[in-house]
Image (cartoon, rainbow, N blue to C red):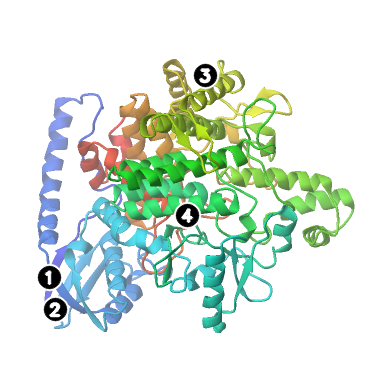
Amino acid sequence: MQEVVGSNPIGSIPGRVNGLMKKRLKPQRPVAVIFLLLAVLIAATSSICCTQRAASVRRKIRVDIKQNIQRLIEEEDTDDDEKITIDDYFIEGPRGDKKFHLIDQKGKKYEIEGAYYLSNLLQELTLSRPGQGRTALLDTQKIFENPVHRISRSIREVYWDGLTRRIDEENIVPLFTDTKTASIDGCNYIYVPNDDNKAYQYFVTVADRHPSLKIKVVRLPKVITPEWVRSRNDYPGLLSLVLACNPDEKCRGVPFVVPGGRFNEMYGWDSYFEALGLLEDDRRDLAKAMVDNFVYEINYYGQILNANRSYYLTRSQPPFLTSLALAVYEKMPKNPKSKGWLRTAFQAAIKEYNNVWMNEDRLTETGLSRYYGVGIGQPPEVEPGHFDAVYKRFAAKLGMAPVELEKLYTAGKIDVPELDKFFTHDRATRESGHDKTYRWDDRCADFVTVDLNSLLYKIETDIARTIEKEFNNSFRLEDGTTQKSSVWYERAKRRKELINQYLWDSEQGLFLDYDLVNRKRRAYISATAFYPLWANLASRQQAESIIRAVIPKLEMLGGIAASTEDSRGPLSESRPARQWDYPNGWAPHQMLAWQGLINYNYDDIAHRLIYRWLYTITRNAADYNGTIPEKFDVVKRSHRVFAEYGNVGTEFSYITKEGFGWVNASYQVGLKILPADLEEQLEQLVPPEQIFE
């Protein structure tokens, strides 16, 4: 017996539904053409509605999980990538025909058609496997779920939990897996701050209880130097975060969200964007926990770290703590407890502002700050071979083999000042979060950047307003000194003046990075042009000028590109593509641009950009087995990005249980902002070019 339960062509026949949807903001068409389109629309809608009615009848079908997965993969995964996508080609008979007969326990067959629905079936069967025994009840409503609803629900119900980690006895094993680097002695290292005795004793006890894990607990020195960090490059490990212990000394790690894939630790600026998504999904406690872990990092490690691995101890990332703390506080009940929590977060933020971003390494003669790469030698977390071209270039100058140079230099047995300088700039680029890009031509530390100084302006105004509104204009620090809002308003005012002096380019009509060595602005147009709008730094006239100058050059089919093609320059074998340049688009740039445009009442443009980005995510997820990657080629609207490290989030079997942190967040935040009529069109996968001029 056979029953057809659905065959909506979304995903399986790209474009078939798309061309039938009503266009917005397009010129009126001749009457005859309009009648013809209406006739086609009515006919098509009739068949689609029938399918949706069939699919909307909620059924619970008990099936043999293993048997159906095996048959489904054998029939439809014709390219053997353990996914069902539009790239699975037809071979013969039922192989690759995008039709499958799901068989229930009683032998009844249900025909399911279309790559999107078949990939949903594969995912639902896979989710039913753990702990469910041989059979499970499948909910057909989830198989035929609209892709927008499915992606958003999966982020809310599956992905956030899949990305959540804790550093404690119960949860530590998955964190030991660091594909970026491993210790040479095969041991698993946990590094604990010098003066966190509670954490040290706890992890020593854990190590004693689990000798098979080969855990080594190392207490950090009181003063952490670049030399000491380099001495531990062969013994990398986790850095402890907050432990919450109850009166009977039972401790649990305070949770945090990781980006996903090879990035299996708590990252600096990723966490801000992830938290915005968590807050949209009512996961306030998890967002708050991430702030608590950042406060711990500042108090014990001196700064918010690039991530909590030992090789990141001397490197930070773009500062978003005040923005993150205020976003969480906005969702909290207003009482003395939440006010005390906010005070603690802002005390830490002020400490980091003074000790990191205004220190002698990062504060420049202009009065503005730069990213700076504190550390010695090459960053150890990169994949083998990443710096081959660099060593080849310097080895030629020194008359030695590149492999020999790398070995001696990494071991600290040879001094190469030019190579030291290169890696200082490389580390600065990594601290910026934009690793890598041609934006600074490998001289990041020589630039005062638009993004960093916009962030610092935002921090200064956040502190000023919070002291004024939440703490009656008197804010006591841990050392007993009192901060006044007027001081912070003055700092923000002065920074704004300097930003306008050094970074505003009236000819280009936007803010540009300033080259400290050559004493001029660099005409490189990147998505960081939106930071001054996000920070409410630009005047109304400047905002209008920036939008006029940047939107036509950075807006692509799939969202905002990281840079223009002209700015990036030509590519070649000796000048390969870099991931933070054209044609790639990144979630943090999209989210900052959206909010910046909304800040200056350019809501229509923001909605258009949101739609482009969400359509890119939805189309790729629908066509490629739920894939939600780290970034996209926004020119082609594709997840196929091969520059440098490839694209994290695209490698999985049967189902992704994580997505990718900040892309997940951008989806939830974007849906919240998107007007209802555009969300309806997104649900029908109407391409943006059919909606917008």
Mark 3 vs 2, N-terminal side: 2
- Labelled pair 1, 2 in contact (Cβ < 8 Å): yes
The mark lying in front, picked from 3 and 2, is 3
Residue annotated with mark 2: 108
- Amino acid type at circle 2 is Lys
- Labelled pair 3, 4 in contact (Cβ < 8 Å): no
Residue at x 56%, y 65% (from the top left corner): 197
The label shown at residue 320 is none
Q: CA distance from mark 4 to mark 2?
A: 53 Å
Mark 3 vs 4, N-terminal side: 4
The local secondary structure at tag 4 comes to helix
Q: CA distance from mark 1 to mark 3?
A: 62 Å
Residue annotated with mark 1: 3
Tell me if 118 is positioned left or right of 36 in this view. Answer: right
The label shown at residue 509 is 3
Tell me if 572 is positioned left or right of 556 in this view. Answer: right
Q: Position of residue 684 (x, y in %)?
A: 23, 46
- Amino acid type at circle 1 is Glu
Residue annotated with mark 4: 293
Q: In the displayed structure, would residue 545 be above or below residue 394?
A: above
Q: Position of residue 570 (x, y in %)?
A: 63, 37
Q: CA distance from mark 3 to mark 4?
A: 40 Å
